[in-house]
Image (tube, rainbow, N blue to C red):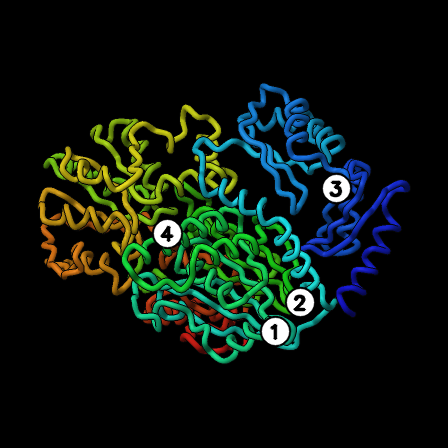
Amino acid sequence: MSSEEILKNIAKEIYNNVPNGTIITNIDFEGPEVVIYTRNPSMLVSDADLIKDLAKKLRKRVVIRPDSSIIMSEDDAIIKIKEYVPKEAEITDICFDPGISEVIIEARKPGLAIGKSGSTLREITKNVRWAPRIVRTPPISSTSVQGIRNTLHRECAERKRIMKAVGHRIYRSENVRSDWIRITALGGFREVGRSCLLLQTNESNILLDCGVNVASDDPSKAYPYLGCPEFKYILSSNELDAIIISHAHLDHSGFVPYLFKSLYDGPIYCTPPTRDLSMLLQKDFVEIAKREDKPCPYSFKEIKDAITHTIPLDYKEVRDIAPDVRLTLHNAGHILGSSITHLHVGNGLHNIAYSGDFKFSKTRLLEPANVRFPRLETLIIESTYGGSKDIQPSRDDAEKDLLSTIRRTIGRKGKVLIPVLAVGRAQELMIVLEEAMRNGSLPNVPIYLDGMIWEATAIHTAYPEYLSKAVRDQIFHHEHNPFLSKCFDNVPNSNKRKDIIEGDPAIILATSGMLIGGSSVEYFKALAYDERNTIIFVSYQAEGSMGSRVQKGWNEIPMKDENGRTQAIKVNMEINTIEGFSGHSDRNQLLRFVNRVSSGTEKVFTNHGESGKCIDLASSIYKIQQKNKIETRSPQNLETFRIY
């Protein structure tokens, strides 16, 4: 049965169930949804049970949208919306997404904008005809969030074309039961960096992550093995159904735009924060390559293409992404918007969870990774800290160690440099440092934020629902918002760095976290010689990175100066590594996670770790889970393994 025939049957069911007088102008697939366009949407929207019943009967998500012929012009809609929404709601922005006939209303008091039991929303839907979505005004304005909205507005016609094509591809056949399932390791197996997996059935091809190894300048080690015969054929013959991105860090998302350079025209699935943060990090990746005169595999155009092709999903939303694959994203606790990918394959045949990077314990910033899945037969789990000795200190001990090191350094009139990932570790540390400053645990010195940290933090405040309850509550009460504390001083450009380096004692959070490009390298060059200063590593340092060399205690680090000549940087500063701030699960947390999901699990595959750690974790899981007869393996890159 073709997608057109399936759509005809769906339309017949819809016409048989909508109220008399409903004027339907079109029914079509758009991405993983059935969209009903109507000239009187309020008739359908007012009956919440109707849409639920239709979705249940069709076993698909059903969305109601106003026909374009009845919606107001954007200028008139803004005037009307301001009439319906009380001034006390404090609207700060109104923007439109014509591709889905949606108006996004930002307000400082969203409850007042929604109205009692949604009364204001119903008035807007009925009279303005745009579908309203109310969001809380972020405490910090984000140029990335606004830029993405502008792109979606500008590219609305192209996006609609993409979504229709995706929808018809998803529903090209129905009730498909897979005969087999296999996975090919294209990157990130027995290594950290360039994570990439290809999942195949007899019906579908899906890519899980597509990252870069930023610690390597060798293309054969920096990028996934997309040139292998099976993937090369799938891409060239337009048979790749979807890309799923677990989270925004470049080793998981950094190579995605390249696929659009290679003529991929399909969807990307991820959470909304992952979309926004990925764009931020990918743009920085291109800018650093240009600045350092290095080749880059893609340009800003391909990043824009990736945004246009992204279908954002919230946690626990279930969506069809291929005729025999259903996707659900679950909180991974690693960074904002990070997700464990759960795939329901073959209409009940087999269930797979790909952990991506995850943290199975509560942090200041995020709730712990989800561990409850309806069914799970195969688990692909990260092994960053999978070795037998990879036990991290408690978060309390890590915080005490951090504050003690900072006090010691400030006491000798030194500066503290903390190379951080702009996304995740930076915000975690900001919360700790702000609290310590507020309660007097740290001396009153400036905390400088250099690189993309401020913009990444702005994106965090735009998605408070993805943060821990404690931080969410603080953001909703501006007087307690840790990110708005006066102790933080954003460094908008490089002109201020000279004053910081030559100035009084200070704490400097700077990107990148592994001393690979970014402002942290400039600070390290200037501060490394002085034994009063300290560098504190709080995140994983990949083998081959400059951060790894410093961490190992190299006394001299070869670096190029402004003229391209190599010079040796003498390292006299104190070097400190504090493991407890990692966004990855340690050995005990990994084993505890597997134990919690082991009921019904048949296979566990390890990835995203040094070779010995991947093998060690797989072996340990096998021994511990013998009673459950779980098969474990630690595949290598380019291996294909059948899971059903």
Disc number lying in front (3 or 2): 3
In the rendered structure, the answer to whether residue 609 lies left or right of residue 267 reads left
Q: CA distance from mark 1 to mark 4?
A: 36 Å
| Residues under numbered marks 3 and 2 in contact, where contact means CB atoms less than 8 Å apart | no
| Residue labelled with disc 1 | 201
Q: Secondary structure at mark 2?
A: loop
Q: Which residue is mark 2?
A: 324
Q: Is residue 159 above or below residue 118?
A: below
Find numbered disc 1 in the image and state the secondary structure of the residue it sits on: strand
Which corner quadrant holds the N terminus?
bottom right
Q: Which residue is denoted by mark 3 in the rendering?
A: 66
- State yes or no: discs 1 and 2 in contact (Cβ < 8 Å): yes
Disc 4 marks which amino acid? Asp
Q: Between marks 1 and 3, how big is the CA–CA gap?
A: 37 Å
Q: The disc labelled 2 sits on which kind of residue? A: Asp
Mark identifier at residue 284:
4
Secondary structure state at the residue bearing disc 3: strand
Is 592 in front, or is 204? 204
Q: Position of residue 602 (x, y in %)?
A: 54, 70
- Of residues 554 and 391, the one nearer the viewer is 554
Which residue is painted at 85% across and 54% down in the image? 13
Tag 1–tag 4 contact (CB < 8 Å): no
Q: Answer left or right for 452 relative to 444.
A: right
Quadrant of image for the C terminus: bottom right
- Which residue is most to the bottom? 229
Q: Measure the alpha-carbon separation of dots 3 and 2.
A: 31 Å
Name the residue: 56% across, 28% down. 107
**N-term-proximal mark, 1 vs 4:** 1
Tell which residue pokes out farthest to the right in this image. Answer: 20
**For the residue marked with disc 1, what is the amino acid?**
Thr
